[in-house]
Amino acid sequence: MTLQAAGRQSLVDTVVDALRAQLSAGEWRIGDRIPTEHALAEQLQVGRNTVREAVRVLVHAGMLRSRQGEGTFVVSAADPAAIMRGVQRSGVRDVLEVRIALETEAARLAALRHEPTDLERMRAALDAQRGLEDAEGRVPAGSLELYADHDIAFHQAVVGAAHNAALSATYEWFSSSVREALVSGLGDREMPQLLHGDHHAVLEAIASGDPDAAESAARTLLDRPKRAVEALLTER
């Protein structure tokens, strides 16, 4: 198999694509050790340094794992980067629906597991957010991104208060799409304003230790923008 660099794509990128395709096709199963650098270099007809760099890319992506003295093993056949690109292409409604699924469960768990520092993080994020609003509760155009950052910080604090490592990692990975959708919504006059009362209701429900109330408050918080988006899509 001979590889040629396509356009501006580097040879390393081309080898990454070839290895990713073999992983996705199931040529190597999860747990299998992939061929040595020498064998892959011969198969792909490239230098060993090129193979080494390509393997490093896939190790960093979470598809492969190297073990000192043992070789490189398959961890996942799914490419997280491809999944992320799919998320980034999703619409605002899709992002909101996933947020509801993640954040309502996070709020429920947070009510049961939160620590005082978790509540402090939530309050600090809301205070910083409110400090950017004008007298009418509007956010100046120049502060939209910072306002969004504080909002994301609040929701990350809620998720963090669930003390579930997998949930936190998933939300951290997803939060760039949440932020993008949020900035877009803040700049759209047809979208409802963020209400501090709704945010504080989530905080207080978590602080009370009532998981049902926390889940309900988190759902109410996100239901308003979801309904607005659905109404806009219906009009179009």
Image (spheres, rainbow, N blue to C red):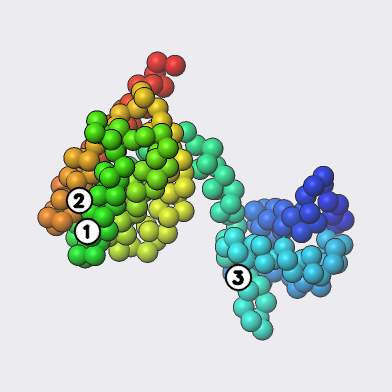
Tell me, for residue 43, which label it has, or none.
Answer: none
Left/right placement of residue 196 relative to residue 96 reads left
Q: Amino acid at mark 2?
A: Leu
Between tags 3 and 1, which lies in front? Answer: 1
Q: How many marks?
A: 3
Earlier residue among tags 3 and 2: 3
Point out which mark residue 203 bears: 2
Amino acid type of the residue tagged 1 in the rendering: Leu
Q: Residue at x 82, y 45 (%)?
A: 7
List the residue tagged with mark 1: 119
- The three-letter amino acid code for the residue at tag 3 is Arg
Eye-nearest disc, 3 or 2: 2
Q: Quadrant of the N terminus?
A: bottom right
Q: Look at the numbered disc 1 and give the secondary structure of its residue.
A: helix
- Mark yes or no: residue 102 visible: no
Q: Are marks 1 and 2 in contact (CB under 8 Å)?
A: yes
Looking at the image, the residue that sits furthest to the front is 135
Residue drawn at x 34%, y 48% is 150
The residue shown at (51%, 43%) is 87
- Disc 2 on helix, strand or loop? helix
Q: Position of residue 182 (x, y in %)?
A: 40, 38
Viewer-nearest residue: 211 or 225: 225
Give the CA separation, mark 3 to mark 1: 37 Å
Q: Position of residue 206 (x, y in %)?
A: 18, 54
- Count residues near mark 2 (Cα–Cα under 10 Å), then give few for <14, some for 14-19, many for 20+: many
Gap in angstroms between the C-alphas marked 1 and 2: 7 Å
C-alpha span from label 3 to label 2:
40 Å
Q: Which of the 4 quarters of the picture holds residue 178?
A: top left
Please give the residue where the numbered disc 3 appears in the rendered image.
65
